[in-house]
Image: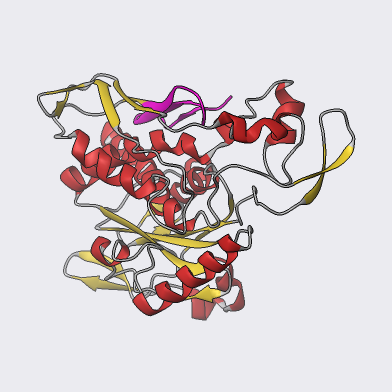
Amino acid sequence: MGSTFGQLFKISTFGESHGGGVGVVIDGCPPQIEISPEEIQFDLDRRRPGQSKITTPRKEADRCEILSGVFEGKTLGTSIAILVRNKDPRPQDYQEMATKFRPSHADATYQAKYGIRNWQGGGRASARETIGRVAAGVIAKKILKQVAGIEIVAYVTRIKDLEVAIDSNKVTLAQVESNMVRCPDPDMAAKMINLIDMVRRDGNSIGGIVECVARGMPVGLGDPVFDKLEADLAKAIMSLPATKGFEIGSGFAGTLLTGREHNDEFYMQGDRIRTKTNRSGGIQGGISNGENIVIRAAFKPTATIMQAQDTVNTAGEEVTLAAKGRHDPCVLPRAVPMVEAMVALVLCDHWLRQKAVS
């Protein structure tokens, strides 16, 4: 099972949704990076369940424990292990799912591949696995900010058919965190919250889009052919639970333009080559060009809903299932720090790889 990500800055996540706990082991972190549990906790709190009326009501504080690799507030250059213990599991809520496969969930495919699965909340397929990614992402963001001046901010731009354009050059973390849906536009955020709450009361779910910008990018991160920077970003984003699409720069909308309309013309700013537009999304030929990297991740509606659906059971019989448990009616608000983390992990890994050859 692929639980390891990265080449030089490498993470391995562990744990199941309703087991003893979840976490991450980080290898390749440089020494003397200042980091505290409080810094990690900030992003874990953004990701944790039970934070608002539009997220799952599961009550988990998600308090992190740094078990190794940090001494007197600084990284040692050795493996960093971070653990978050599960405090509010309710495996009994999933008893019916031990034999009935949830539509559009990983239940049936896990059973077919391994012949066994942890049906208590989905095991490794649960979004709870992302705790380790978010914790590691905090350290990656700290490295990028400290050594390269790179800032990463993600935010919600779409919930179902409610969509707003956000200026990625100016959006701030404070604007993102000013409301529970994490949309920087307050008027649209209010509409999104009302829609999610209405869907929640109906026992249903909806999806949307998270956009992420990396500002202060250096030139030269990424490699040609199979290790293109956008290819690694795509893999990182698409590894998140519930993702169904990835875009960079103009994305699919770029197909509506001609080459003359789409090309980012160059100009000189002092001794630096800049682009007049950024439809490339900060990457050309698989290598960062110094402009902002702008990506978008599409998240499907949460698979587990409270309405009756047709399915099959482990005996191959056609049955119905109305799921129980505590689930997000929309994953987007909690997905924001997950997207930031995955972008940070990729950029940190590529920054270290670039320094290794320069």
Task: Please state the total of marks drawn on the protein image.
Answer: 0
- The residue sitting at 42% across, 77% down in the picture is 188
Image-quadrant location for residue 300: bottom right
Query: Against 211, is 37 above or below?
Result: above
Percent from the top left, x then y, of residue 328?
53, 51
Query: Against 204, is 257 above or below?
Result: below
| Nearer to the camera, 6 or 314 | 314
| Nearer to the camera, 166 or 242 | 242
Percent from the top left, x then y, of residue 205?
61, 58
Query: Against 105, is 271 above or below?
Result: below
Percent from the top left, x then y, of residue 68?
25, 19
| Start-end of magenta stretch | 1-24
Q: Is residue 165 visible?
A: no
Percent from the top left, x then y, of residue 261?
50, 80
Image-quadrant location for residue 344: top left
Residue 312 falls within the magenta-colored stretch: no
